[in-house]
Amino acid sequence: MNQPRYSGLSGLCQVTEHLYISNGRAAGDSAQLTRCQITCVISVTEGLSCCPPAPAAEIEHLRIQLSDSPLSPLNDLFLPVAKKIQQHAESGGRTLVHCNAGVSRSAALCMAYLMKHQGVTLLEAHTWVKSSRPVVRPNPGFWKQLVCFEKELRAWLSLHLPKVNFNPSFTSAPSTNR
């Protein structure tokens, strides 16, 4: 695993050489985008008005409208977003994935990318992204979708989720039992 770089909550946090995660405010900071040589911004927000201003013309900007709800079908985005990140990585580019707070939607998408293209387990992907951005905490519905995605990729699970109702105050971390 690459050693991620943590830039604090207000900056772009490097997950891999070609992948960054942040909140919406940092994603709208053209100086940070330039400094980190970002070539693609993937915005996953509740509404298009929540997206930061479009980055410079040379930066591809993919806007995805999706709420941070346990019932939102984020799993429909796992493969297309992972493919987009990988395409930019293969051409030497760098992708920034962000949502409003840089905690749930963007974290889950980064984790799906790491599982698909870096060959890591869900548990390893979570540890990797959390070491880059310590505040990450996908909501319970996204965790469930990530568990299903891991099962599709590997036919086994690296962790099991505790039984929870979809209570927004959920704070438990998944267990590591196999």
Image: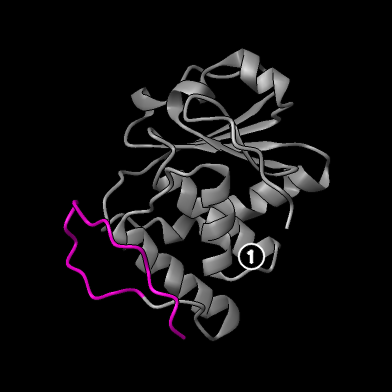
- Relative placement, left or right, of 71 versus 131 is left
Q: Residue at x 68, y 68 (%)?
A: 119
Q: Of residues 30 and 77, which is closer to you in this image? A: 30
Magenta region, main secondary structure? loop
Mark 1 lies on residue: 116
Q: Position of residue 13 (x, y in %)?
A: 59, 35
Q: Quarter of the image containing the N terminus?
A: bottom right
Q: Residue at x 40, y 66 (%)?
A: 145
Query: Dot 1 lies on which element?
Result: helix
Residue 73 is situated, as x and y percent measured from the top left of the image, at 36, 58
Q: Give yes or no for residue 171 being in the magenta stretch.
A: yes
| Relative vertical location of residue 134 with respect to residue 80 in this rendering, above or below | above
Image coords of residue 37 (percent x, y): 74, 26
Q: Position of residue 170 (x, y in %)?
A: 23, 57
Is residue 66 visible to us here?
A: yes
User: To which quarter of the image does residue 80 belong?
Assistant: bottom right
> Mark 1 belongs to which amino acid?
Lys
Residue drawn at the location 61% of the way across and 65% of the way down: 115
Per the rendered image, the range of residues in magenta is 161-178
- Is residue 80 at all visible to an observer of this figure? no
In which quadrant of the rendered view does residue 88 lie? top right
Count of numbered circles in the view: 1
| Above or below 63: residue 104 | below
| Figure check: 131 above or below 50 | below
**Crowdedness of circle 1 by 10 Å Cα count: few (<14), some, many (20+)?**
many
Q: Is residue 68 left or right of residue 176?
A: left
Residue at figure coordinates x 54%, y 19% from the top left: 54
What is the image's colouring? Answer: one colour
In reply to whether residue 4 is colored magenta, the answer given is no
